[in-house]
Amino acid sequence: MEEEASRHSVALVLDFGSQYTHLITRRIRQLGVCSFCLSAAEASLDAVAKLAPSLILLSGGPHSVYEPGAPSVPPGFFDYVRDRGVPVVGICYGLQLIVAQMGGSVEPAANREYGSMDVVPVAGSVLYGDDDSTQSVWMSHGDEVVEMPRGFVVVARSVQGSIAAIENPDLGIYALQYHPEVSHSPKGIDTLKRLLFEVGGLTDDWKVQDVLQEQIDLIATTVGPDDHAICALSGGVDSTVAATIVHKVMGDRLHCVFVDNGLLRYKERERVMETFKRDLHLPVVCVDAGSQFLAKLEGVVDPERKRKIIGAEFIAVFDEFSRKLEQELGKKPKYLVQGTLYPDVIESCPPPGVVGHSHTIKSHHNVGGLPPSMKLLLLEPLKWLFKDEVRKLGKLLGIPEGFLKRHPFPGPGLAVRVIGGDVTEENLETLRLVDEVFTASIKEAGLYDEMWQAFAGILPVKTVGVQGDKRTHSGSVVLRAVTSEDGMTAERYTFKREFLDQVTREICNTVVDVNRVFYDLTSKPPATIEWE
Ligand SMILES: Nc1ncnc2c1ncn2[C@@H]1O[C@H](COP(=O)(O)OP(=O)(O)OP(=O)(O)O)[C@@H](O)[C@H]1O
């Protein structure tokens, strides 16, 4: 991280556990500025200083600054930024922390402000310049400033009168009670630009191309000429791009494995293996482990248990693969290639003891969680990148566009789409056929790229129907399609009525054992994209 930072000017985000922290870092990078994120509860002042940031942002978070043990900046932080003239920007919790640290006070608000809100800036401030027109912003807080710290001025208020932004240009401290990084704050990006380029004096010299070359050079200097590496390929974008980068350096000393866990979509194994071989020339072995996975999943309906079982089974298959490889090569492979992304890096080190941190929502399934006995060293060429950056990189590497644009698919596969039900071969077959009718129709209608994700789930209800002349008692399925910028929030996709009618007809006519089709209208939040 430091190496990368030394070549660029850096905007550092200190994370206090907000769902939106990644987004702040991503937005900054989209503006061409190198940005990293450190967990506020773990980062020492030394770690901050090593990155020599030109601007430091304090993120939002789920805590209240007045609670005992509320997370704060490392000791000596405000002396450090003052001595070095590094501007600081607080966002939401970050604002409240600044207020509390600078001698003001924060209390629970009488009215929680959540969602879209209009705020009115004060003309002539550093944060807004001459633009005092009302802007719509995204708020998400339950506390408010009741006493301003000395030397700070209010530079925007919500139409309800609460404080929306404050600044103290002499100290170089600025703070927003709302989230400028989310798309629901359309002018937030202008405020971020002012902060980065005018206040922080940063330059937009950070490009994905540079990361590719840096990673190729790094791998070339790390691995020895006789070292071998292994990689678990899911058919997803991350592991594919990671493997393709490593393959450029190591050639056939990279050994990839694709596991058919019996939880894949319709003809997925054939489709994915063909792309690996024909388009990417990656050396891939396909392991057929379907019956092994299904045997372990028999009778399991709890989603977390499904995930854990699948994770453990992946590791067993992977272990076996590397044992065989060792026999063939006469030596142990030394490296494991993983498509770890930057959000995974941030997520794997949540602040200790911090309750309600954003990163504990779902137990993470990752085949990379291998037993330490395997003693593999990691090659993680994507670990500083976000998904959209990985797609750009994949394009630079010549990975087919259709492959890069594939909708995300969960690691535990179709198992988590047999909702509340038994993961039987019969259920999986029904699900595959329904999913294929739905996604093929979406592709035919040219709608696939408009969506973040589209899939079917099977529901644990049988209902009465009439099909042909017969009364049936058959299964129900749900269709879900969402749009999203980054998967953090999502809106349901609105199909034309005729499209849904057509798909429903086709499903009921062609898939035995389905007589009822639902469409999920919910957004995220309050729902998640997947059902389990
Ligand atoms: N069927 C599979 N065969 C081999 N490896 C797999 C398989 N499914 C998942 N993996 C491995 O587990 C990792 C994490 O899986 P997950 O589905 O959570 O993917 P992800 O983080 O979105 O990455 P990707 O885009 O590579 O799928 C993958 O990057 C891959 O290394």
Image (spheres, rainbow, N blue to C red):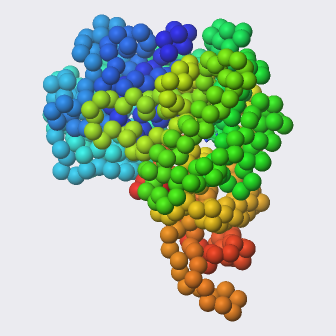
163 relative to 435 in the view: left or right: left
Instruction: Say which residue appears at 55% left-offset and 36% top-offset.
Output: 315
Residue 350: percent from left, percent from top: 36, 31
Between 133 and 379, the one lying in front of the other is 379
Q: Quadrant of residue 49?
A: top left
Residue 299: percent from left, percent from top: 49, 61
Residue most toward the bottom?
469
115 relative to 414 in the view: left or right: left
Q: Is residue 125 visible?
A: no
Q: Say how many tags the image has.
A: 0
Q: Quadrant of residue 381?
A: top right
Q: Does residue 459 sit above or below 240 in this rendering?
A: below
441 relative to 351 in the view: left or right: right
Instruction: Say which residue appears at 22% left-offset and 32% top-offset.
Output: 70
Q: Quadrant of residue 135?
A: top left
Instruction: Say which residue appears at 44% left-offset and 12% top-offset.
Output: 51
Instruction: Say which residue appears at 43% left-offset and 33% top-offset.
Output: 347
Q: Is residue 357 visible?
A: yes
Residue most toward the right?
278
Q: Does residue 238 sit above or below 267 in this rendering?
A: above
Q: Does residue 116 sit above or below 384 in this rendering?
A: below
Between 157 and 277, the one lying in front of the other is 277
**Ligand 1 location (quadrant):** top right
Residue 250: percent from left, percent from top: 73, 18
Between 309 and 320, the one lying in front of the other is 320
Residue 223: percent from left, percent from top: 65, 12
498 relative to 34 in the view: left or right: right
